[in-house]
Image (spheres, helix red, strand yellow):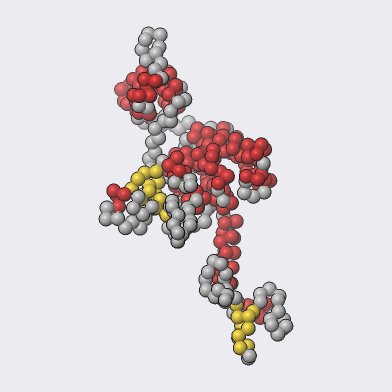
Amino acid sequence: MPFLGKDWRSPGWSWTKTEHGWKRMFLYGHELEDNREIDLKGLCNDNLFVGDVCELATTKRKKDLFNNNTKSQFIFVDKWIYVHNRSTKERHVYSTLGEALNRLDFSSAIQDLRRFNYVAKLFQLIARTQLTSLSGAAQKNYFNIMEKIVRKVLDDHYNPRLVKDLLQDLSMTLHNLTIHVGRCVLVGNVNIWLCRLETIHKWQQQVSNLQIPEQTCNGMTFDDLPLHMQNKILCELSDAYDIINVGQAMPTLHSLSEDRILWKKLCHFHFSDKQFGRNLVLSNSEKVDWKLMYFTLTKHYPMKEQYGDTLHFCKNCNILFWKDCGHPCTANDPDSCLMPISPQHFIDLFKF
């Protein structure tokens, strides 16, 4: 019995009405049961192709044309994804990392400064370990978003150091996969991946040659602030390399960037007291060298991550979403069910 409805297993047959009843119609130059030739142009004009087959084919052609001619991901109405993390007797289905990349709006997220670092860190983790687990469509979407990340840095001069690390990890991963491992672990032709590797090297060169122009300011500058205010601003930075770069701007800031109290606060922000006891670093004066202590601890323990905005997971609905986009929650108190998701936790949600 053929499927006549909209079913993914079979789109159904097309039929034409004749004097002797209904007969099955074959497309694209085949013959009917009475061996009469089909005039394709005439059939199209008479709207005999209207049906499930042509509707599904037209939808697929439009989707393929959109994905091939655009640099953005396929647009979904819902900006959230239901995470299938278990299988039942009735349903054996799991959500994949590639589906999450396609469904969640990362293209718009990188335009928000609160989410840029989060997306860049997530893509760095994917580049290190999860690139081969993505489907072909997800890999294409991944590199389209990567192009937008690089363009954001080149246009707005925002956080080039983070993107340099991301491109370095991505370049090393692709080099190992295409040269040492082989094309068997990659989706698509190996020549496409070699072209992508070449594109990454071009992005690395563009980011490395980035020159941030000096801005003339007629008003008060950072150097005009009192020292205690400058020190307070430096204490708000959570990245050690940002503190070091600020200290290289001028001699007065260099002395502030070497302050022991500043590095002590930074150590306590990222690490616990138990970790200090195992890796205590003393200077010649028997005092703790907090700057050296910080870089010693980074070799043994992960640092605390801090982002302006993250993806959230609803424990009641098992839905992953951006908080400002919302989702159809059925809980009486939706806010109590929300849980912020770090980049590593995002990847762990799709490991089975």
Residue sitting at x 36%, y 31%: 219
From what the image shows, is residue 149 above or below residue 245?
Answer: below
* Image spot of residue 45 (x, y percent): 62, 80
Identify which residue, 224 or 129, lies in the foreground.
Answer: 129
Identify which residue, 188 or 47, lies in the foreground.
Answer: 188
Q: In which quarter of the image is the N terminus?
A: bottom right
Give the farthest residue toward the front.
89
Q: 311 left or right of 140?
A: left
* Image spot of residue 80 (x, y percent): 42, 54
Residue sitting at x 52%, y 71%: 6
Residue sitting at x 57%, y 56%: 67
From what the image shows, is residue 56 above or below residue 94?
Answer: below
**One can see residue 113 in this view:** no
Q: How many labels does the image show?
A: 0
Residue sitting at x 63%, y 90%: 20
From what the image shows, is residue 79 above or below residue 111?
Answer: below
* Image spot of residue 99 (x, y percent): 50, 52
* Image spot of residue 186 (x, y percent): 62, 46
Give the farthest residue toward the top.
285
Q: 166 left or right of 326?
A: right
From what the image shows, is residue 241 above or below residue 320?
Answer: above
